[in-house]
Amino acid sequence: MDQQPVVVAPQTSHTTTTNHYRAFGLLAELTYRCPLHCPYCSNPLQVAQKQSELTTNEWLRVIQEASELGILHILFSGGEPLLRRDIVQLVASAQQTGMYTNLITSGLGFTRHRAQELKAAGLDSVQISFQADQAELADLIAGARAHQRKLAAARLARELGFPLTLNVVLHRENIERLSEIIALAEELDAQRLELANTQFLGWAFQNKEVLLPTRQQVTDAHHTATAAQLRLRGKMEVLYILPDYYGERPKPCLFGWGQRFLTVNPMGNVLPCQTAGEIPTIQFDNIREHSLPWIWEHSSAFKLFRGTAWMPEPCRSCPHKETDFGGCRCQAFLITGDPAQTDPTCDLSPHHLQLTQMVEQLQQSATRHFTPENARKIRFRTDPISSRD
Ligand code: SF4
Ligand code: FES
């Protein structure tokens, strides 16, 4: 998967579990195998081998338990979820429980046969990642010849009547092509376009020197996106996610740790978000040992930063604490070394200066382009993980 999926705020706040927090969405990361090598991938730096992935029966159990937990929305993701032969069976199973099903794919492997099978299984919508509007640049960013196949996949999705979302992770290299990217989404008849500035987690944090856009680029992109939102209202939903590093207040990451969303990774670990596994001090429970409802209710990892009682100052006495939940735990860990700190992207955080100095330094040492000379500064996923099972 490119980056943390963009999730829409749940409308409900009623409870079906005794712990007051209602699980709304599940990110099912079926595999970390992927044909692409995006330098901002949110998969772990060390990905698991195929042999340790959950089996079909284990995933079917997860889906059933997710339904019992009251999950309404399941996102099948990866890596590339189409590398799993059982994807159609898993989608059908989720569909039968009444969950809304969404496939998050690179588009590679979305063949006519597969797409028709998924349609017959009841898949509700398709999201395809694009790296840019031009093949040459897009393939350079993806580290693979993928752009033409993505175009074909997007057209096929629309031909078969799937609602289509295009997701484009923005960074220094593609952000100036925003107008052209929006035009591409229009041409492909997408219903939704997610323009998500890079979240500097996982591989993106390793590659921030080549990914971080300038403040001017971000300002210009904001204007372009806002104009497109107005022009396309009623035709295509354009979502523009501001970059945390240039903001003053953090976003409510996934609407609070362990409060609305959960992720099951390919090995069955259950996480509040997809990059939490990179925090070495936290032990996560596994669906091979406990049921999903048990983990939601009792896992110490989920309780760790749930609600507001865990918060240090300045969050503890801040009027925004019920709105942003102190920001992102993974970001706090990456920048301060402690996931329990206030997110440093908040200008009230005692570590905010550390962040702004880091951003300034990155601007000065910025590598402008993904040229061959600069490639040595980019850390790509190199694991041989594109095989289909
Ligand atoms: Fe949010 Fe904490 Fe900053 Fe207040 S101090 S705005 S709760 S991150
Ligand atoms: Fe993990 Fe924000 S991405 S808490």
Image (spheres, helix red, strand yellow):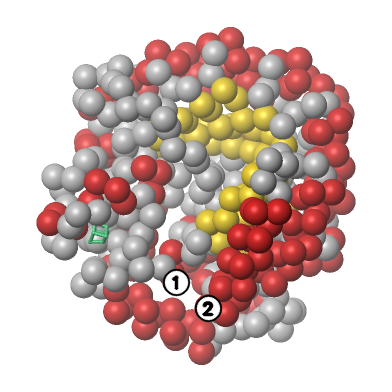
- Specify whether 10 is left or right of 282: right
User: Residue 193 placed where, x, y %?
Assistant: 67, 48
Instruction: Identify which residue is drawn at 85% across, 34% down.
Output: 156
* Most distant residue in the top direction: 96
Dividing the picture into quadrants, the one containing residue 158 is top right
User: Label 2 crowding class (10 Å Cα cut-off): few <14, some 14-19, many 20+?
Assistant: few
Name the residue that disc number 2 marks. Answer: 215
Vertical position of residue 195 compared to residue 267: above or below: below
Q: Badge 1: few (under 14), some or many (20 or more) residues near its Cα, within 10 Å? A: some
Q: Is residue 336 left or right of residue 144?
A: left
At x 32%, y 27%, the residue is: 13
- CA–CA distance in space, label 1 to label 2: 7 Å
Point 82% across, 22% down: residue: 116
Question: Which label's residue is closer to the chain start, 1 or 2?
Answer: 2
* Amino acid on which the number 1 mark rests in the picture: Tyr
Vertical placement of residue 152 versus 203, above or below? above
Looking at the picture, tell me which residue is in the foreground, 21 or 41: 21
Res. 243 in view: yes
Look at the image and tell me in which quarter the C terminus lies.
top right
Residue marked by disc 1: 246
The amino acid pointed to by label 2 is Arg
Q: Which mark is residue 143?
A: none
Task: Work out whether residue 330 can be spotted.
Answer: no
How far from the left and from the top, in percent, is residue 281? 26, 51
Q: Is mark 2 on a helix, strand or loop?
A: helix
> Residue at 24% of width from left, 69% of height from top?
348
Q: Where is residue 46 in the image (x, y as percent from the top left)?
A: 50, 53
The answer to whether the residue labelled 1 contacts the one labelled 2, judged by CB atoms less than 8 Å apart, is yes
Please state the horizontal and vertical placement of residue 365, each as a whole percent of the image: 53, 88
Q: Which of 92 and 17 is in front in this view?
A: 17
- 117, 218: nearer the viewer: 218
Q: Is residue 268 left or right of residue 225?
A: left
